Image (cartoon, coloured by chain):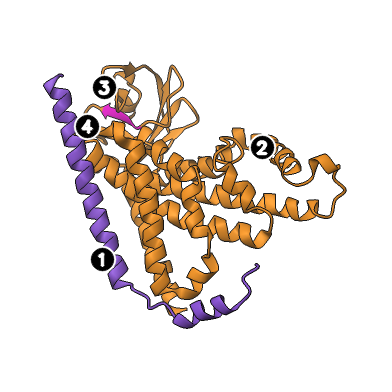
Chain colours: A orange, B purple
Amino acid sequence: MKRLRQYAWLVGLLLVSVLLVGCETGHKFVKKTAFKDTDKMVLVFAGPVDESWASNVGNFSAYEEPDPDIVLTIKETILSPDKTQVTLIFADPVNTGEAHIVSATNILSEGRDLGAAVLTVKKLYIGVLMTIFIGAALINNFVFTKYLGLCVFFGTSQKRGTAVGMGVVFTIVMVFAAVMAWGLYQFVLKPYQLTFLNVVVFIGLVSLSVQGVDTILRKVNPMLFKAFGVYLVLVIANCIAIAVPLILADNEYSGWESFALALGAGLGFLIALFLMACVRERLELAQVPPSFRGLPIAFVTAGLFALAFLGFSGLSIY
Amino acid sequence: MDPVLVKLALAGVATLGCIGLFFGIGLAMAAQKFHVEPDPKVEEVLHTLAGAQ
């Protein structure tokens, strides 16, 4: 129990630190910057700013961080009644997935000049992580929308117990492997221009993490090891385990983003396995035509699940 | 052959070799550190059983 509380503290601390990292804006008089709707940005100041300064569109310029040469056109600026909040309205929709740089000329507050500001406007980092997590778990569920990992999926989804066991083991191994893959890709493969060896290295990495977890768990927690049983070895045969490192390398994800992707992929697999196992347990008692019994009806069910998961495709939280 | 490509290939072999060696030694050390004595009785019992299942 005491141990558990320690872990909870640690996780809480990490979350807070991630949140804080997402909050820095670039100028001490600017409290907060954020996107609003699809074509607006909000700058919140620590005190009131002058209307003459804020209402002049020419005082602001904005561009997407990767393309400094493409300056976005600002249609209008609106100062809130309490004069601490400026809303920039753009002529075109803004790509909110990308960080934007807003430069403002010397900020005037009650006649005083507070210096020019170069501000970063981006989604809160935790929001980006949540988007990746939910994307991997539901919207782009690896089993139902990408059709990966089907062999293990059909092999271990006959009983609820085995399904959950497989899902949990897979999630743990996946997180280990993905974080290692991120490190190896960013700090070894990319600097030495060996990215064409991605597949080879990642396959080795997955088997390495499986072997590592196997070796360590056998000694540290034999009960858990017994509970995991054969599933640990089965993780190697799962195509999702190689898809996740390749995706995070393709998208140039950072360490936290890789972590979120791996966790989402693992949890999505767990959800898929659990749902499928629930249905297959009932199918045992159903009157299925003889030629459909067993695997064929399971494939039909998986297809129906895939259709149902299409419903998640429009989901966006942040 | 283009010397740049040769260099790249050799660098790849060397880097992968290093990675392999590094993780191989790591795994070997882990195996030694977390070594578990296999219980001889388990083997014996398994041997005595029919083993049909």
Distance between the alpha carbons at the discs numbered 2 and 3: 41 Å
- Dot 2: what SS? helix
Q: In this view of the protein, which residue sits in the foreground, B3 or A175? A: B3
Compared to residue A175, the image places residue A49 above or below, namely above
The picture places residue A9, in percent across and down from the top left corner, at: 39, 68
Question: Dot 4 surroundings within 10 Å: few (below 14), some, or many (20 or more)?
Answer: few
Residue bearing the label numbered 3: A68
Residue bearing the label numbered 2: A306
B14 falls in the magenta region:
no
Corner quadrant of residue A103: top left
Looking at the picture, which amino acid does disc 4 mark? Answer: Gln
Looking at the picture, which amino acid does disc 2 mark? Answer: Ala
Distance between the alpha carbons at the discs numbered 2 and 1: 44 Å
Question: Dot 1 surroundings within 10 Å: few (below 14), some, or many (20 or more)?
Answer: few
Foreground: disc 3 or disc 4: 4
Q: Bounds of the magenta span?
A: A99-103
- Dot 1: what SS? helix
